[in-house]
Image: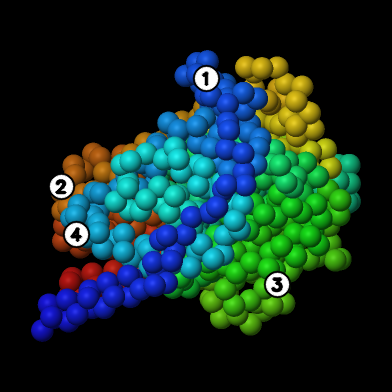
Amino acid sequence: MYKKGLLALNGLMLVVMTSCGVSKSLHDTPNVNSFNSQIPERQKIADTFLIAGANRLLKNQQGLWELSVAGNPYQLGLVSGSLTKELFEKQEEALLGKVEEMVPSKFKQYMLRKILAWYNRKMYLHVPEEYKSEILGLSKYAGDTYDYVADDYLRILYLHGAHDIGHAFQDLALVGCSSFAAWGENTEDGNLVIGRNFDFYAGDEFSENKIIAFVQPTNGYKFMSVTWAGMIGVVSGMNEKGLTVTINAGKSKVPMEAKTPISIVTREILQYASTIEEAIAIAKKREVFVSESIFVGSAADNRAVTIEVSPENFGVYEVPNSEELICSNHFQSEAYVHDEDNLKHIAESHSMYRYQRMEELLNEVPKLSPQAAVDILRNKEGLKDELIGYGNEKSLNQLLAHHGIVFQPSKRLVWVSAPPYQLGAFVAYDLDEVFGGNSEKGRSLQNEALIIESDEFLFTEAYANYENYRVLSRRLTEAIQNDMHLGPELLFEFEKSNPDYWETYYMLGQYYYKKKYYTAAQNAFGKALTKEISTVPYKQDIQHYLKKIKRQLQ
C-alpha cells in the first residue's frame, strides 16, 4: 500500500513539474542581441594574476582575490566568467560537490532536477532582465560536472536563490549575521561607521576563494562587493556614492516557490540607489521569498536604517532619537511587532543575545572608529565578557564567518577581512582611488597605509586548540553517525580543546548515549546544561536526552 502511494505521489509530482509553468521557465533565456558581446581575450600573467584588456583578477598578499570589471550587463558576465573560470568551477564543487555523495542514484538525480525546476519555476519572472543577461554571460564559463542539476544558465540562476534557502534553514546554523552602525556624537568625526559579520557557512571550501569585486556597469553607479565566483548578487557592498548594503537573515518559513533572490534586490539597490529613500523604493517593488533585514547606510543621509522584507510584509526600522543602529537576525520595525514567527525567533534563538552583546560593546566605545568596529566584530566572549566557548552562535565572532567588513561611507573607505574568519588583516580599499583608475598595473588595489593588522588571537594556543577542536568534532560526528569506536584519549583531548563550549559536552553525550554508556552520557549532558547554550531547542533536546537516560538507568 505504501509503495503504491509513493508511486502515485511521484507520478503526480512529475505531472506538476512538467506543467506549462515549468516549461516556460526552462525555456526562458534573456535576449542579449542588443548588447555588444565583444570582450578582450584573457591573458594569464601568473597563476594569481589574469587580465582581459582593462579588466583584471589578482590575488593579493593577504589571500583575497580582487576582481575589476566593466561593461554592459552581458559583458560583465562574460568577462567575470572568463577571468574567474577556475575559481568558478571550484565554487560549484564546494556548493554542489556533496550532491552526488548524498544522491548517488541517477534516478534520484533526475528527480532532483525536476524538483528544482518546479521550485524555481517562477524565479525568471522576478529577476530583472539585465541581471539575467549578466548571469547568462557568466554561465558561458560554467563547468560541465553538474549539468545533471540543470543546464548552465538555469543552474547559475538557481544558485542565486540557494543563499535564500540557507537563510530559510538558519536553525541549521547556516546563518547568524551581526551588523551595527554609529554616527554623529557616537563616532570620532561625526560621520557614519558600519561593521558587519557575514556568518554564512557552507563548508570550509566555500570560503577559501573570497572575491572583492569592483564593478563599473554601463548603467548605474560603480560599486564594490565581497562575493565569490559565480555570484553577481550582493551580500556586502558599497557604491561610489557611499551607499552601503548588507543583509541579515530573518526567521522564514520554508518557501514553496522562489521569487526574487535577496542578493539580487541588494545588487539593484547598490547599483541604482544613492540615498536611503531610493533604496527603500527599490526594495518595495520586488517580491522576495524569504525574510531578510537589508541594512542600508548612506553617506548622503549620514545614517543607517534596516529595510525588513518578507513574502507577506514590509517595514523600515529607523532610530530617529538615536545615532546608533544594531541588527542581528530578528525584525524591529512596527510592521513586525506582532509577527508570531519573529517573536518566537527572538525568544528561542541566539539573535537577541548577540544584539545585547553589540549594545554592550558599543557602550564601551564612546566614539566608534574603524579599528573599534573591527575589535567588536572579532569579539569571541559572551555578555559581560563571559567565556562561552569558541564557535558559540551567541558570539559575535563565531569563528566561521565568510567575511567581516567595515565601511566609512563619507570617505568611500572599506575594510574587508582576510582569512581565517575575521582574524586575518582587514584590508583597506579607497573607492575613489580604485575607480579613479590610478592604480599601478599588476599591484593590489588596496590602500596599504590603512590596513588593520591581524588579530593576536591567531597566534595563541587557544586558537590552535580551537582548530584542533574542529578536526576532532568531525571525527566525533562520523563516529556518532556510523557507530564507530573512539579511544578515551581522543575523547579527553576533544573535551580539553574547547572546554567552555556547550556543544563539546552535547556531542560527547550523544556519543556515549549511542554506545549505551548511560552514566557517562548523563554526566556529559549535565555539564552541557551548565554552559551558555545557543538556542532553546538545543537546550530542550539535551533535557530530552536526560529524561531518556533516566528511564534507562532505573
Residue located at (85% from left, 66% from top): 320
- Mark earlier in primary sequence (2, 1): 1
Instruction: Give residue 221's quadrant in the image.
Output: top right
Per the rendering, the mark at residue 367 is: none
Residue located at (79% from left, 60% from top): 278
What element does badge 2 sit on? loop
Per the rendering, the mark at residue 107 is: 4
Residue located at (41% from left, 40% from top): 142
Graded by Cα atoms within 10 Å as few (under 14), some (14 to 19) or many (20 or more), the crowding at tag 2 reads few
What element does badge 4 sit on? helix
- Mark earlier in primary sequence (3, 2): 3
Graded by Cα atoms within 10 Å as few (under 14), some (14 to 19) or many (20 or more), the crowding at tag 4 reads few
Give the residue type at disc 1: Gln
Q: Position of residue 328 (x, y in %)?
A: 62, 60
Per the rendering, the mark at residue 315 is: 3
Which residue lies under the disc numbered 1?
Answer: 43
Per the model, the C-alpha gap separating discs 2 and 4 is: 35 Å
Per the model, the C-alpha gap separating discs 2 and 1 is: 53 Å
Which residue lies under the disc numbered 2?
Answer: 485
What element does badge 1 sit on? strand
